[in-house]
Image (cartoon, rainbow, N blue to C red):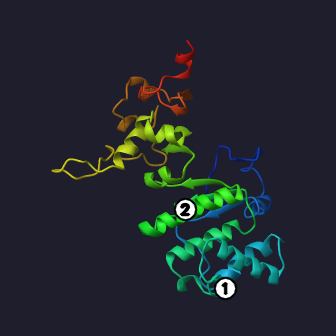
């Protein structure tokens, strides 16, 4: 979507946005979507922001590049966006360079830039990774507030289950490039049905045994690209794996309130087909 893959990269599958296929669209069309329709926030704002441009100029450039404002108006709106993401003294920050402001302010500036052109979809890639606990909480609160105020759809990419629990309405769990489980956040967080989802939840918790305070790690390691196992890609690490898991890739099916791809899900929820019968 961002067009950041190298020229030699091979991309397959389908990416649909508002019923439009994006993979086969020319770069010029995709550039028109990035900003006015799709905003992106990256993990490390210090490496994502231009080090030789003031923060406000970078936000203004986004508006000017899409013909949404002239130079003076774009600069004014840049200051307004910085204020909207709760940056104190936005005029000063607009004139500052990225290295002159804190990590939390840089991430807020990235959010301001991503939202400046008024997109309906915001893709946030690990937006709280480099932040301390207090700033992380403030950032999540800000994203939730912007989501409500601007009627945004946010795709939040994260490995932090605490972040997921805090902000998600729906959760999609990926393993080795395949969807393991997808459904309402409450259903997945409270009662995961896929063994990988359950293992993720467990690994996020520290053992409560007073004598053994350690993480509950998932056995084994994720497969490398081009070395995926046959059948279910999680079966070499799955405690519920049987022979069919090794031979046949499970289709995605409805299971209670969620959809999942598993031959032997955790039987806490009754499949809808069984419920109807």
Instruction: Give residue 3's position: percent from left, percent from top.
Output: 67, 61
Image: 157 above or below 231: below
Instruction: Give residue 168's position: percent from left, percent from top.
Output: 55, 49
Residue 117 in the figure: left or right of residue 265 = right
Q: Work out whether residue 267 can be spotted.
A: yes
Q: 187 or 32: nearer the eye?
A: 187
Residue at image location 44% in from the left, 54% down from the top = 162
| In contact (CB < 8 Å): disc 2 and disc 1 | no
Residue 97 in the figure: left or right of residue 76 = left
Q: Work out whether residue 7 can be spotted.
A: no
Residue at image location 52% in from the left, 43% down from the top = 185
Say which mark, if any, is on residue 227: none
Q: 161 or 134: nearer the eye?
A: 134
- Tag 2 residue: 141
Density class for disc 1 (Cα within 10 Å; few <14, some 14-19, many ≥20) is some
Instruction: Give residue 18's position: percent from left, percent from top.
Output: 76, 47
Mark 2 or mark 1, earlier in chain:
1
Density class for disc 2 (Cα within 10 Å; few <14, some 14-19, many ≥20) is some
Instruction: Provide the secondary structure element on which disc 2 rests.
Output: helix
Instruction: Give residue 246's position: percent from left, percent from top.
Output: 42, 29
- Tag 1 residue: 91
Q: CA distance from mark 2 to mark 1?
A: 23 Å
């Amino acid at each position: 979507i961002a067009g950041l893959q190298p020229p030699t990269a091979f991309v397959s599958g389908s990416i649909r946005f508002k019923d439009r296929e994006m993979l086969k669209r020319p770069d010029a069309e995709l550039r028109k979507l990035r900003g006015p329709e799709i905003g992106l926030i990256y993990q490390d704002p210090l490496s994502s922001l231009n080090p030789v441009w003031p923060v406000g100029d970078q936000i203004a450039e986004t508006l000017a590049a899409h013909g949404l404002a002239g130079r003076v108006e774009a600069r004014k709106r840049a200051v307004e966006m910085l204020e909207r993401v709760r940056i104190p003294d936005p005029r000063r920050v607009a004139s500052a360079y990225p290295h002159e402001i804190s990590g939390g302010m840089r991430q807020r500036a990235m959010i301001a830039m991503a939202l400046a052109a008024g997109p309906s979809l915001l893709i946030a890639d690990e937006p709280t990774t480099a932040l301390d606990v207090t700033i992380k909480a403030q950032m999540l609160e800000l994203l939730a507030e912007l989501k409500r105020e601007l009627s945004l759809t946010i795709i939040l990419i994260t490995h932090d289950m605490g972040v997921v629990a805090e902000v998600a309405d729906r959760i999609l769990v990926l393993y080795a490039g395949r969807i393991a489980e997808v459904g309402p956040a409450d259903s997945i967080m409270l009662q995961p049905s896929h063994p990988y989802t359950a293992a993720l939840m467990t690994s996020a918790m520290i053992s409560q045994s007073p004598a053994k305070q350690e993480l509950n790690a998932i056995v084994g390691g994720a497969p490398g690209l081009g070395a995926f196992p046959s059948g279910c890609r999680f079966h070499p690490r799955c405690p519920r794996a049987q022979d069919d898991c090794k031979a046949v890739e499970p289709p995605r099916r409805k299971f209670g309130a969620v959809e999942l791809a598993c031959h032997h899900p955790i039987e806490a929820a009754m499949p809808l087909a069984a419920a109807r019968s």
